[in-house]
Amino acid sequence: MTRTSGTPQRSCLGCRKTFDQNDLIRYALTPQGMVVPDVRRRLPGRGAYTCWSPLCLAHAVQRRQFDRAFRQPCQAVQDDRLLADILKALRARMLGLIGMGRKSSQLVAGSNAVLDALGRPRQIDLLVLASDISAGIAEKVSRKAARVEVKCLGMFSKIELGPLTGRAETSALAIYQGKLAEAFAADLQNYRKLSGES
Ligand SMILES: [Zn+2]
């Protein structure tokens, strides 16, 4: 069988199925023998992989597959600790993308700017509404977004989003279509799979 893709294939330690390496979570082993998620794929040494699935991660842990993959006994691995670390890393990366998007004008922040941007909805990929946005603003923004068929995501707090957009707090932002939006959407999809939201 010939492969057209040059991307290495790896199997998930949970379900044992083989996937394109970029579609799996990578794990690395610290010098102390601790399994850590390597969401940025930058840690040195041998890697182990699972699907973006809490079930596959739990299976891998229960069956001690990390010991086998790293060819040594790893420090006690807890799937809930790994899961929490991965979700935290994904959140940090999405927040980083928002900060980059602001600097490179690939998004606008603030409810008034978002309402303005919704006047040109075809340029917008997604709205992010802070989970602690005031009910009145949320309704106003989401009603207009629904009318022009733009998706809204409720995530992060006003204080998490604020400093990334040059403010103390930010309730809403609109991410324009493009590479940054694609990277954000990919992380978001994995976040949802792992947190059981999809
Ligand atoms: Zn799997």
Image: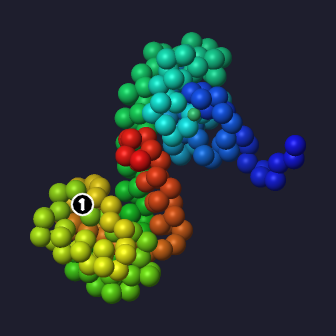
Q: Amino acid at mark 1?
A: Ala
**Mark 1 Cα-neighbour bin, 10 Å: few <14, some 14–19, many ≥20:** many
Which residue is more in the foreground, 149 or 190? 149
Which residue is more in the foreground, 27 or 115? 115
Quadrant for ligand 1? top right
Residue at mark 1: 130
Residue 16 horizontal/vertical position (percent): 64, 28
Residue sitting at x 41%, y 76%: 124
Is 105 rendered above or below residue 159? below
Query: Can residue 45 be spotted in the picture?
Result: no
Residue 59 horizontal/vertical position (percent): 51, 23
Q: Secondary structure at mark 1?
A: loop
Residue sitting at x 78%, y 50%: 6
Residue sitting at x 38%, y 50%: 92
Residue furthest right as drawn: 1
Which residue is more in the foreground, 160 or 190? 190
Q: Quadrant of residue 100?
A: bottom left
